[in-house]
Image: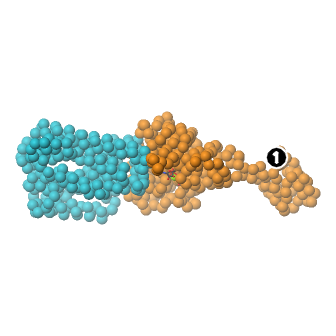
Amino acid sequence: MIDLLHAELKRTWIQFIRYPTEVISGIVIILAVFYGLFTSAQYIAGPGFAFGDRLDSVVLGYAMWTLIISVNNDIAINLQIEAETGTLEQVFLSPYGAPRVFLARAFASLALRLLILIVVLLLLMGLSGSRLAFPPILLLPLASLLMAGYGLAFLLGAGALVFKRVQQILGIFQFLLLFLLAAPLEESMGLIQYLRFLLPMLPSTGLLRDLMARSLGLDWFTYGLALLNGIVYFALGLFVFRWAEATAKQRGSLSGY
Amino acid sequence: MLDARDLSKVYGRGKQRFEAVKQVSLTLHQGEVLAFLGPNGAGKTTTIKMIAGLVRPTQGRVAVVGEDPHRQPRALRHIGAVLEGNRNLYWRLTPEENLEYFGVLRQVPRKVAHRRGLELLARFGLEEKRHTPVQKLSRGMQQKVAIAVALIHNPKLLLLDEPTLGLDVEASEMVKALVRQIAQEGRAVLLTTHQLDVAEELSDRVAIIRRGRIIAEQSTESLLKEFSSSTYHLEVEGDLSPQQIHTVTQLGATVQGTQITYAGTPENLYGLLGALSPVPLVSVQRDRADLTQVFLKLVKDQPDTSL
Ligand SMILES: Nc1ncnc2c1ncn2[C@@H]1O[C@H](COP(=O)(O)OP(=O)(O)OP(=O)(O)O)[C@@H](O)[C@H]1O
Ligand SMILES: [Mg+2]
């Protein structure tokens, strides 16, 4: 499994780095967005205020948004492309089984995107003199957030396996994600207060707001629920992915579209 | 090695329902090459993918070295495959990187995958191209890399779906030579092709499929024999005397200059040869059907049982 992860990291990295123009344009876009955040946070709409209006929080909001979108895109779009070009079947010939391979791919993709992001952030911090500070306890809700995010990635991957065309879904997904990251449903009353635990990522983003914007401590009971939410969506994603795999094999549609 | 029993595949439902493969059974032993032949749309690719665990059979079962790739992903360790179409590789990666990546994907430890990858590249004559992205290689080289990748985990069964498609004569020869070597190493090879000369040269056995059903399966040699007539063609050097021509004609042969055609029994051939003495012989040849003739005859002659 370590070898598999290593191999996926290497493949992702080589495919990324082989065409420098793509690398540069990708980095320039991220750089521009975050440069905007650093210089005039308040003028950029989007998930910027998801976790409060301090620079740290704005950056965190954008970072999570871009990370989850890019990991989801990587999984779903690459699945679609590989089905069209034919490498997908070779991947499904792996004795590891497809879910494990795609999990490794999701990690590799996260690692790559995170690396780019960190490089960009360090660069901007150097340029602007601003400092970002994140309490280590953030890692806990981030972990449950990412788990649910991976679950969504597998759901989209399953969609790509069965329906082949996923661009439109991915477009809609960006807005859905905006809602999941930024809607402060933890402030609402009544039924929604409970229902929010059923939606992916919402409990984790609520906790991040507690920590970043409201300077509250981590409520361990709520965190337990957030973690459960992450685990359930992750498991659901895997389950649906397996179903999609079986369906594609049934239809004989792993390759082509 | 391979034991596939009664494989059937139905695609679609209702009006779209289509039975692509019907009750196909195939077995393959160590070191054996089976050519799987059939017209377009006969169900070859579907069968191969069912064996590789990529298409789920509607009925029947597959065992590769005793394991079912549909139930136990572990069974895939025994299977290497180069599938139809031209993309079995990551085009942005070099041959060396592809080999290492797919090696690990097939559960070979990374270091071993790297070493075996280099060995395979050397063996396939691709050493100087090992750092060129696959995208920039010729079609023949890409195909060789794809075969190398299919061998990286040392599989016992190799599935090749149209391995010589789109290759020029020289590249085809290379691929043929490789397939022969691979079988000699003791692997079982199942290959499909529309180039019947390739099949004839490489295969120990042929299976012919038509409209999803196997219509012939036997050793290549015996199939060719069965379809060969017992006509002999002889060629002599110099002219026969009128006396010799008379005797030969009486034995049932026809003479045209230095060419003699004889359709008798093999035993009586010796009488004929005696009568020709002492004129030097250039060649004695028995009419031999080639696989193309056999194939066309089988595929056309069969009564249509499928409808
Ligand atoms: N995924 C699928 N869904 C529906 N029908 C399919 C599917 N795949 C193949 N078929 C049909 O099944 C039949 C057999 O196809 P298959 O690809 O196995 O043929 P083949 O023998 O490999 O042909 P070729 O020599 O052209 O490669 C064809 O009629 C094809 O249209
Ligand atoms: Mg085919």
Q: Give the quarter of the image for residue A80.
A: bottom left
Q: Secondary structure at mark 1?
A: loop
In the image, A257 versus B26, the foreground residue is A257
Please state if B88 lies on the left or on the right of A201 as rendered: right
Q: Residue furthest top?
A: B66
Residue A228 is situated, as x and y percent measured from the top left of the image, at 20, 38
| Mark 1 nearby-residue class (10 Å; few <14, some 14–19, many ≥20) | few
In the image, B204 versus A80, the foreground residue is A80
Q: Please tell me which residue is depicted at 34% across the width and 60% down the height of the picture.
A: A18
In the image, B150 versus B128, the foreground residue is B150
Could one spot residue B51 in this view of the protein? yes
* Image: A25 above or below B105: below
What color scheme is it?
Answer: by chain
The total number of labels drawn is: 1
Letter of the orange chain: B
Q: Please tell me which residue is depicted at 25% across the width and 42% down the height of the picture.
A: A233
Kindly identify which residue carries mark 1: B265
Letter of the cyan chain: A
Q: Please tell me which residue is depicted at 8% across the width and 42% down the height of the picture.
A: A217
Residue B47 is situated, as x and y percent measured from the top left of the image, at 51, 46
Residue B306 is situated, as x and y percent measured from the top left of the image, at 58, 47
Could one spot residue B2 in this view of the protein? no
Report if the beta carbon of the residue with label 1 is closer than 8 angstroms to ligand 1: no
Q: Chain of mark 1?
A: B
Look at label 1 and name its amino acid: Thr
In the image, B142 versus B265, the foreground residue is B265
